[in-house]
Amino acid sequence: MLFSEQNYKRGIYRGSIEVICGSMFSGKTEELIRRLKRAQIAKLKVEIFKPRTDIRYDVSDVVSHDANSVQSTPVDHSSEILFLNADTQVVGIDEAQFFDAELPAVCNKLAEKGIRVIVAGLDMDFTGKPFGPMPALMCIAELVTKVNAVCVCCGSPAMYSFRKVSSEATVLLGEKESYEPRCRFCYHMTEA
């Protein structure tokens, strides 16, 4: 079905893009799983995707830090998401920051077909800069939910992922041994 003003006015399209973003340990994946499970309870056809490179908890499933999980399909490139089942109504995408720059266009194509797209990912890398396709996704989304962790230094809301290990690589898969959530003040205190 092609996107047209006439079809939109008749209410044929119900597609949308939702982005859940924040630092590490802020509950992004937990919120993604919660929304996807609610869609499944509503008997909607759901498909979930994640980058094949993310194997921290499971090779194929999307798993939160709290060990909640949902079955997913690992993909190498965002264009593979377009090959989903024809009857899919809701698409979940985890760790969006690790995808290629085509992910926003893929999400737009899905939404224009009437699919609800729910995307979760880090909005900033460990240096505090926008991460991968996340800024573009946030711009085109109907709904953006920013979640915060708790700063491990002072207990304030944390929006930064502080890297504890020495590495300049933008992508460094890791957990609590490599990263900790920090507020703005505590994150920048380490620079002084």
Image (cartoon, rainbow, N blue to C red):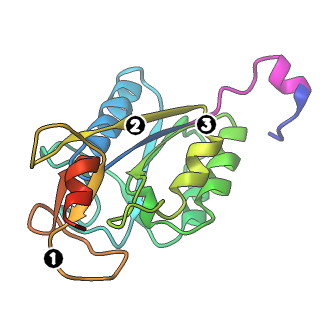
Question: Hey, what amino acid is under mark 3?
Answer: Ile
Q: Is residue 80 left or right of residue 175?
A: right
Query: In the image, what residue occupies the spot 19% across and 81% down?
Result: 166
Q: Are marks 1 and 3 in contact (CB under 8 Å)?
A: no
Furthest-top residue in this view: 10
Q: Quadrant of residue 179?
A: bottom left
- Residue 168: x and y in percent read 31, 82
- Residue 157: x and y in percent read 23, 37
| Residue linked to disc 1 | 165
The crowd level at tag 2 (other Cα within 10 Å; few <14, some 14-19, many 20+) is some
Between circles 2 and 3, the one closer to the viewer is 2
Query: In the image, what residue occupies the spot 31% across and 35% down?
Result: 31
Classify the position of the C terminus by image quarter. Answer: bottom left
Q: Secondary structure at mark 3?
A: loop
| Residue linked to disc 2 | 146
Q: Quadrant of residue 190?
A: bottom left
78 w.r.t. 61: above or below: below
Image mark count: 3
Disc 2 from disc 1: Cα separation: 26 Å
| Residue linked to disc 3 | 115
Which residues are the magenta region?
A: 6-17
Q: Secondary structure at mark 1?
A: loop
In this view, the residue in front, 6 or 162, is 162
Q: Are marks 2 and 3 in contact (CB under 8 Å)?
A: no
